[in-house]
Image (spheres, rainbow, N blue to C red):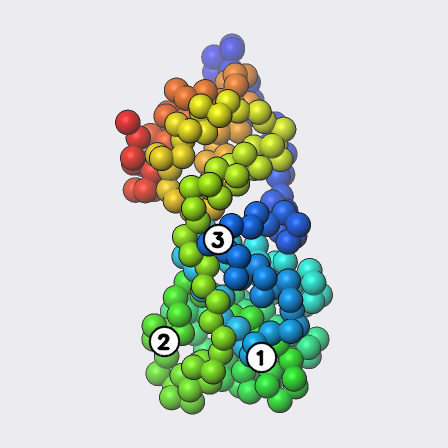
Amino acid sequence: MSPSAQLPLRLDHRPEYGLDSFIPAPSNRDALALIRRWPDWPAPVVVLCGPAGSGKTHLSCGLCMISQVQIHEASDLSRISAHEMIAPGAAIVEGADEPGLPEAELFHLINATREAGATLLLTARTLPADWPVTLPDLRSRLRMAAPVVLAPPEDDLIRQVLVKLLADRQILVDRAVIDFLLPRMERSLSAAARIVEVLDREALSAGKPITRPMVAAVLRRLGNDFDAFARDT
């Protein structure tokens, strides 16, 4: 190991998922407003749709804190009864459009939600009409759900998220470095979080501030694992 290199101190850095830390933007305005107005929703079942890294998990965690209910994965539907899941008066199920969805169990959960006068939030990357659902009764129930769409994040939102994530780690970076990074990275909030984590460790290990050459090197390295990071020049 080079004598000038430092071993990074591996401290857990847990992201904040409260609504106060959610950065509003045109791409997420409708979804954020809907979560904030819970339980005054347009329908008992709401489907929050958006691409990976658009903020679905942050918003579902925000609802979790407001409603004091647990977040479930779609696979949990096979081991937890519909009435048990909806007993608190609300339920949150993430990844509802992933392969292997327990269709009959989701159908029963939607029925239990309506019968109990409760609310159900489903998150997915696509609208229910595009889900590979084979159960006609479930497809009918999903058509009555209220869809809320998260658009891909704008450049300004990604910039604000990068600055916030860096500030959360007590890292100050020149605006020119952010300007260099922004057009070369994957257009998602999850990519922003990943890149900040790697840059933090790189800077700590090298004992140097984050610079454009460091950003370029990190992007090249990440490009080995993520095709979207290959836009380095």
The structure residue drawn at horizontal position 57% and vertical position 25%, both measured from the top left corner, is 172
Residue holding disc 3: 26
Numbered tag placed on residue 180 in the rendering = none
Q: Amino acid at mark 3?
A: Pro
The structure residue drawn at horizontal position 63% and vertical position 47%, both measured from the top left corner, is 21
Expressed as whole percent of the image width and height from the top left, the position of residue 194 reads 47, 40
Residue 91 in view in this figure:
yes
Count of marks, rendered view: 3
Element type where label 1 sits in the image? loop
The answer to whether 2 is drawn above or below residue 125 in the figure is above
Dot 1: within a 10 Å radius of its alpha carbon, few (fewer than 14), some, or many (20 or more) residues?
many
Numbered tag placed on residue 44 in the rendering = 1
Q: Amino acid at mark 2?
A: Ala
The structure residue drawn at horizontal position 49% and vertical position 75%, both measured from the top left corner, is 146
The answer to whether 39 is drawn above or below residue 151 in the figure is below
Q: Amino acid at mark 1?
A: Pro
The structure residue drawn at horizontal position 36% and vertical position 76%, both measured from the top left corner, is 129
Residue holding disc 2: 129
Q: Earlier in the sequence, mark 2 or mark 3?
A: 3
- Quote the CA–CA distance across marks 1 and 2: 18 Å
Q: Earlier in the sequence, mark 3 or mark 1?
A: 3
Expressed as whole percent of the image width and height from the top left, the position of residue 40 reads 64, 73
Q: Quadrant of the C terminus?
A: top left
Element type where label 3 sits in the image? loop
- Quote the CA–CA distance across marks 2 and 3: 24 Å
